[in-house]
Amino acid sequence: MKDALNNVNGWVTGLVTIFKSVIVFFVFANILYNTNTDPISGIVSLVDSFIGAGLAGLLALIVFASFSK
């Protein structure tokens, strides 16, 4: 059971790392080239959707952010 959880943890960690790399790539691509994608406004709207839900949204954002550690 412990090996299975370690395996899942490894997969999730890998996916989060890839996701972070893609976000950083799109941010730098948007800085260097004028693209139609705007990852910064997407991140801002995601955080705004959490904060717009009040205290429950703020707590959900904190829990969501704690998963990335």
Image (cartoon, grey):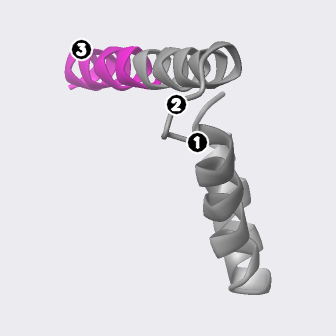
Q: Which mark is residue 38?
A: 1
Instruction: Name the main secondary structure of what is drawn in magenta.
Output: helix
Q: Disc 3 marks which residue?
A: 3
C-alpha span from label 1 to label 2: 7 Å
Q: Residue 22: image x %, image y %?
A: 46, 20
Q: Quadrant of residue 31?
A: top right
C-alpha span from label 3 to label 1: 40 Å
Badge 3 vs badge 2, beta-carbon distance below 8 Å = no
- At numbered mark 3, what does the secondary structure look like: helix, strand or loop? helix
Q: Range of the magenta residues?
A: 1-16
For discs 3 and 2, the disc positioned in front in the rendered view = 2
Q: Disc 2 marks which residue?
A: 35
- At numbered mark 2, what does the secondary structure look like: helix, strand or loop? loop
For discs 3 and 1, the disc positioned in front in the rendered view = 1
Viewer-side residue, 48 vs 13? 48
Viewer-side residue, 34 vs 61? 34
Badge 3 vs badge 1, beta-carbon distance below 8 Å = no
Viewer-side residue, 10 vs 35? 35
Q: Mark 3 or 2 closer to N-term?
A: 3
Q: Residue 35: image x %, image y %?
A: 52, 30
What is the three-letter code of the residue carrying label 3? Asp
